[in-house]
Image (cartoon, grey):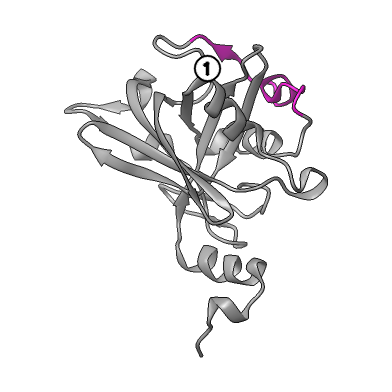
Amino acid sequence: MKFCPDELETKNVYKLLSGAVVPRPIAWVSTISSDGQLNLAPYSFFTVASRNPPMLCISVGPGVGEREGTVKDTLENIRATEEFVINISSTTLGNEVQKSAENFPSDIDEFAEAGLTPVPSEKVKAMRVKEAPIQMECKLNQIIKLGSDHLIIGEMVVYHIQEDYYKEQYKVDLDQLRPLGRLANVFSENKNFFSLPDDNIK
């Protein structure tokens, strides 16, 4: 079988891509608006972009559902403040990640809705998720418009990790972390990986 993207609906191309590029880690992105409103949302189009200087990237799509045609708060806030935090979640926080993925209005604090604790960062204004085992403070490098989406690249300026998740020689204990990820619409769990099937994860 073969498929040509220009002959398919966008949603069907997305299904083919998201079913092939797996597993995908989840960036739990916390931002703050120019007027101080906290925001938190998970994104699975996420990876390391550069090792020196250390950079991370996420891809943010357009609003969906009742917010179709709008710009997502994550993108709007990063444009305004040029800062954000990428939190890494463990399996124990799966329900909270899902809750923060809902299409809340811009004036709703996802930290509060998900029962999470915002804690101050050291070099950026965006809050970190206290419960997240790893939190990476980032300053915006650039935003690149790619078709319907925006690729956000940020330089990681501070790396926080809870002691229980750290191994010697700058290694992360994956047995302890058991990170959340996306595996299309399939539920999967194994020793070191836990997949969320819900399409609410961006």
* Left or right: where 69 falls relative to 27: right
Nearer to the camera, 184 or 108: 108
Instruction: Say whether residue 113 is magenta.
Output: yes
At 66% across and 21% down in the image, what residue appears? Answer: 111
Nearer to the camera, 116 or 109: 109
At 60% across and 67% down in the image, what residue appears? Answer: 15
Residue range of the region highlighted in magenta in the rendering? 106-120
Secondary structure at badge 1 equals loop
The dominant secondary structure in magenta is loop
- Quadrant of res 155: top left
| Count of numbered circles in the view | 1
> Can you identify the residue that label 1 sits on?
126
In percent of width and height, residue 159 lies at: 34, 22
> Is 1 drawn above or below residue 99 in the view shown?
below
Instruction: Say whether residue 118 is magenta.
Output: yes
Q: Amino acid at mark 1?
A: Ala
At 47% across and 25% down in the image, what residue appears? Answer: 85
Residue that extends furthest to the bottom in the rendered view of this protein: 1
Nearer to the camera, 80 or 118: 80
In percent of width and height, residue 40 lies at: 62, 28
Residue that extends furthest to the right in the rendered view of this protein: 66
* Left or right: where 156 falls relative to 80: left
In percent of width and height, residue 32 lies at: 59, 19
At 53% across and 34% down in the image, what residue appears? Answer: 28
- Neighbourhood count class around disc 1 (C-alpha, 10 Å): few under 14, some 14–19, many 20 upward: many
> Is 47 drawn above or below residue 22 in the view shown?
above
In percent of width and height, residue 70 lies at: 72, 41
Residue that extends furthest to the left in the rendered view of this protein: 169
